[in-house]
Image (cartoon, rainbow, N blue to C red):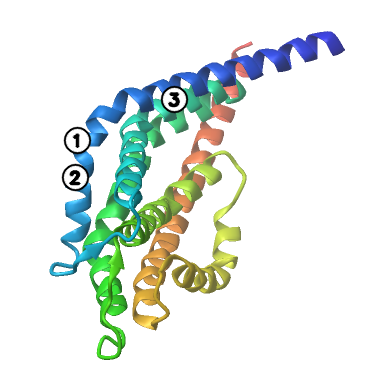
Amino acid sequence: MAEEHKLSFLGHVRELRNRLMWSAIAVLIAIPVAYYLTDKYLLLLMSVSPGTELIYTEVTEMLGTYIKFSLLIAFVIALPFIMYQLIMFIRPALSNKERKYVYFMLPSVFILFIAGAVFAYFILLPPAINFLLTFQADIATPMIKIGNYVSIMTKLIFWIGVCFEIPLVMFFLTKIGIVKPEMLTKFRKWAFILAFVMGAVITPTMDPLNQTLVAVPIIILYEFGILLSKIARRKKKQDETKKEEIEEAEEGSV
């Protein structure tokens, strides 16, 4: 038994290695396209704060920034394939019903992330960057390094995109029976506090306005998640009732 378990474990390790290898190959294949899109990505971020002159102070800084974000864009391009590899790796551990949930949720993951990124770009970034670049500007002239500028904005877009996944996660956890709507409702007041803590962590500014711009959408997303959780719970009970009725009918026929 120990030897079978060991072989099974080694088999999982080999499969994980193969999945990671194919994911890395997908990223490498996406690099030429990502290199072409990096210029457009940098110009898009610069358009948030028109008139701001970005600088670099090290010989390799511009090249390093370009390569760094080319790799990041390549990863984003390859992300659907990477997600597929992840799902195929965990697929044997899921029940048939859980697999259906995962397949159904996968497109929603990308849609919600893009919605969060759009919200960050159009709603959150302009006031946040404006606050940072104009704070005490009469005392010191900002000379912003391009690596720092692009890194901060990318982190904001990424984490806001992640926050927009909250309702989907709550729905899925309810579907598989890990959480219940009542539990989420009781946790509501702590979720509100946590939303403002996340707002303080995610935003690079210390002003209440930008923290609120992050916290309020998170609170709304949490409330929407509770609603989805209730829908998931109701649908789960209906499925269980229907299954019981079918089993009773089959027993009666016997």
For this orientation, the residue located farthest to the left is 51
Marks 2 and 1, how far apart in space? 7 Å
* Quarter of the figure with the C terminus: top right
Q: Earlier in the sequence, mark 2 or mark 3?
A: 3
Quarter holding residue 149: bottom left
* Residue type at the position of mark 2: Asp
Callout 1 secondary element? helix
Q: Which residue is mark 2?
A: 39
Q: Which quadrant, please, contains the N terminus?
A: top right
Which amino acid type is marked by label 3? Answer: Ala
Q: Secondary structure at mark 2?
A: helix
In contact (CB < 8 Å): disc 2 and disc 1: yes
Which residue lies under the disc numbered 1? 36
Mark 1 residue type = Tyr
Question: Closer to the camera, 49 or 167?
Answer: 49
Residues 135 and 10: in front is: 135
44 vs 113, left or right, is left
Pointer 3 residue = 24
Mark 3 is surrounded, within 10 Å at the Cα level, by few (under 14), some (14 to 19) or many (20 or more) other residues, namely some
Crowd band around label 1 with a 10 angstrom C-alpha radius: few (<14), some (14–19), many (20+): few
